[in-house]
Image (cartoon, rainbow, N blue to C red):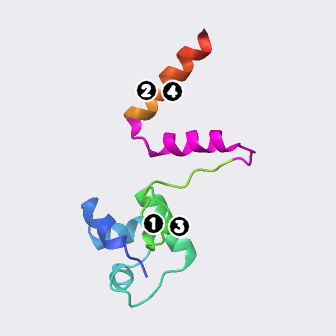
Amino acid sequence: MLHNLKLLRHEHGISQQRLADAIHVSQPSINKYENHNIEPELEILKRMADYFDTSVDYIIGHTDVRRRIEPVEPCCLNNREMELIDRFRSLDNAGKTCVETVVHTLQKR
């Protein structure tokens, strides 16, 4: 089920036809996806996620996190480092910029 597809489309102010054209499917298919009559193939879900700059997980309602999932490198962190990262991730962009400025300033000392 595509819980957030219609929401995303409305927020971006686009018609079913415009989305269909952008991801190379028919307008009736978009209608069926939104009304839970059919499920799209994985490749179509990926195109939707790319179009809306979000994740497939968000489109299908598996998460409330709207941002695209960024690639990560495996690394070992201690509990203190993990807590700092979790707190950093919870900040808005302005807060993240402030933290980055403080870290840069401290590194220059």
Sequence-first disc among 3 and 2: 3
Is 11 colored magenta in this rendering? no
* Quadrant of the rendering where the N terminus is positioned: bottom left
- Which portion, as a residue range, is magenta? 73-93
- Label 3 to label 1: alpha-carbon separation: 11 Å
Asked if the residue under mark 2 is in contact with the one under mark 1, i.e. CB atoms within 8 Å, the reply is no
Q: Is residue 67 above or below residue 84?
A: below
For the residues labelled 4 and 3, say whether their Cβ atoms are less than 8 Å apart: no
Mark 3 Cα shell of 10 Å, populated few (<14), some (14-19), many (≥20):
some
Secondary structure found at label 4 = helix
Q: Which residue is mark 1?
A: 58
Task: Read off the residue under disc 2.
Answer: 98
The percent position of residue 4, horizontal first and vertical second, equals 36, 71
Quote the CA–CA distance across marks 4 and 2. Answer: 5 Å
Residue 13: horizontal and vertical position, in percent?
Answer: 24, 61
Label tally: 4
Q: Residue furthest top?
A: 109
Closer mark to the observer between disc 3 and disc 1: 1
Mark 2: which secondary structure? helix
How far separated are the C-alphas under marks 4 and 3? 32 Å
Looking at numbered disc 2 in the image, what kind of residue is underneath it?
A: Cys
